Image (cartoon, rainbow, N blue to C red):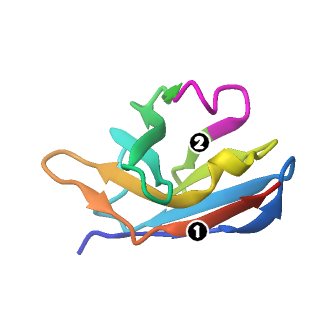
């Protein structure tokens, strides 16, 4: 079975930091595409950051560049999202997505609320 489970969300004030984790099973963890998406209240889900390939090439949404960092630990089969200088507009449910060859796994999400 392949699945991913997010954790690390919470309620913080603007300017704070949070680190999200996405623990994957052996089948779900991949050196291919892994990403974080988020869905704000009343809005569509959007791609926040992704990491691809063994070299770990990364890309970010313009709204989080310079504040968020995506990384993954191969030994722990875990994807991370370090979020610094959080803003109220970062509020939403954050989802982990892993796409090993021929599959796509989504977690149930972790809630992030940033108060002003």
Image vertical order of residue 48 relative to residue 55, above or below? below
Under circle 1, the secondary element is strand
Q: Residue at x 63, y 33 (%)?
A: 64
Q: Out of 116 and 77, give the one closest to the viewer.
A: 116
Residue 33 on image: x %, y %: 34, 39
Q: Residue at x 57, y 24 (%)?
A: 62
The residue where tag 1 is placed is 111
Instruction: Evaluate if marks 1 and 2 touch, with contact meaning CB atoms under 8 Å apart.
Output: no
Residue 56 on image: x %, y %: 50, 30
Q: Residues within 10 Å of mark 1 (few under 14, many from 20)?
A: some
Is 35 left or right of 83, judged from the image as shown?
A: left
Q: Is residue 76 visible?
A: no
Q: Return the mark for residue 49.
A: none
Image vertical order of residue 37 relative to residue 48, above or below? below
Q: Out of 38 and 6, give the one closest to the viewer.
A: 38
Under circle 2, the secondary element is strand
The residue where tag 2 is placed is 71
> Does the stretch in magenta take in 15?
no
Residue 96 on image: x %, y %: 43, 56
**Magenta stretch, main secondary structure class:** loop
Dot 1 or dot 2, earlier in sequence? 2
Q: CA distance from mark 1 to mark 2?
A: 19 Å
Q: Is residue 69 visible?
A: yes
Q: Out of 73 and 91, give the one closest to the viewer.
A: 91
Work out which quarter of the rendered image holds the N terminus and state it.
Answer: bottom left
- Which segment is the magenta one? 61-69
């Amino acid at each position: 079975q392949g699945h991913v489970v997010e954790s690390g969300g919470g309620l913080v004030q603007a300017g704070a930091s949070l680190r999200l984790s996405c623990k994957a099973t052996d089948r779900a963890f991949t050196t291919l595409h892994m990403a974080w998406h988020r869905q704000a209240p009343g809005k569509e889900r959007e791609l926040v950051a992704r990491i691809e390939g063994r070299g770990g090439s990364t890309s970010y949404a313009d709204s989080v560049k310079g504040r968020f960092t995506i990384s993954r630990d191969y030994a722990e089969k875990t994807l991370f999202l370090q979020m610094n200088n959080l803003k109220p507009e970062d509020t939403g449910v954050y989802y982990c997505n892993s796409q090993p060859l021929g599959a796509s796994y989504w977690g149930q999400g972790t809630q992030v609320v940033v108060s002003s």
